[in-house]
Amino acid sequence: MEKTVDESRTTMTQVVFPNDVNNNGTLYGGRLLDWIDTIAGIVSKRHCRSSVVTASIDSLNFLSPIYQRDIVSLESWINYVGRTSMEVEVRVTSENPITGEKRKTCRAFLTYVSVDENGKPKEIPRLRIQTEEEKERFELAKQRRAERIRSLKLEPTEW
């Protein structure tokens, strides 16, 4: 079975409240990480229709601060699917609700593994690539996967 990128693509919107910020008035990195893991988990569950576990967060690059009262938009989709694992990308933008100014604030790549009722890795649907952009993302994700495996000194079949 195959699924398209759009079948699991998800968006989420949050408002930054006083309890979400540090003493500089900017969003806690951990709070943003929680939101990122939440949306990426939803995307991966939608793709495989099973339980998933977070296997890794490859990179989390903060490009600009997010302030109290900002509106935060997260968009997420599948880039790559292996036998039991998948790479999910999350892009985060923030918006000043008064001025309407929007900023690219963060980009993250996460890997999830589909698991069965016993917590063992479970095969997942293949990814049907439909656009040149999806093909490019797939190839870049495949390179990141190979680098993850090299850095962990694992054999490809162990991943």
Image (cartoon, rainbow, N blue to C red):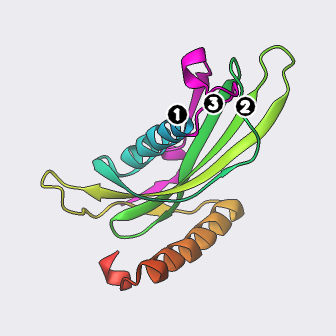
Residue 59 in percent (x, y) is at 58, 59
Spot the residue most to the left. 118
Quick one: quadrant of the C terminus? bottom left
Q: Could you tell me which secondary element the residue under label 1 belongs to?
A: helix
Q: Judge from the rendering whether residue 38 lies leftward or rightward of residue 9; answer left or right.
A: left
Q: Earlier in the sequence, mark 3 or mark 2?
A: 3
Q: Earlier in the sequence, mark 2 or mark 1?
A: 1
Q: Judge from the rendering whether residue 7 lies leftward or rightward of residue 112; answer left or right.
A: right
Mark 2, Cα crowd under 10 Å, few <14 / some 14-19 / many 20+, is many
Which residue does the image show at 69% across and 17% down from the upper left? 69
Three-letter residue code for mark 1? Arg
Residue 29 figure quarter: top right
Q: Nearer the viewer, residue 97 or 66?
A: 66
Residue placed under numbered mark 2 in the picture: 94
* Residues at marks 2 and 1, CA–CA distance in whole angstroms: 14 Å
Three-letter residue code for mark 2? Ser
Residue 55 figure quarter: bottom left
How many labels, in total?
3
Residue placed under numbered mark 3 in the picture: 27
Bounds of the magenta segment: 1-29
For the residues bearing labels 1 and 3, Cβ distance under 8 angstroms: yes
Q: Is residue 14 magenta?
A: yes
In this view, 23 is above or below 32: above
Residue 155 figure quarter: bottom left
Of the numbered discs in the image, which one, if any, rests on residue 31?
Answer: 1
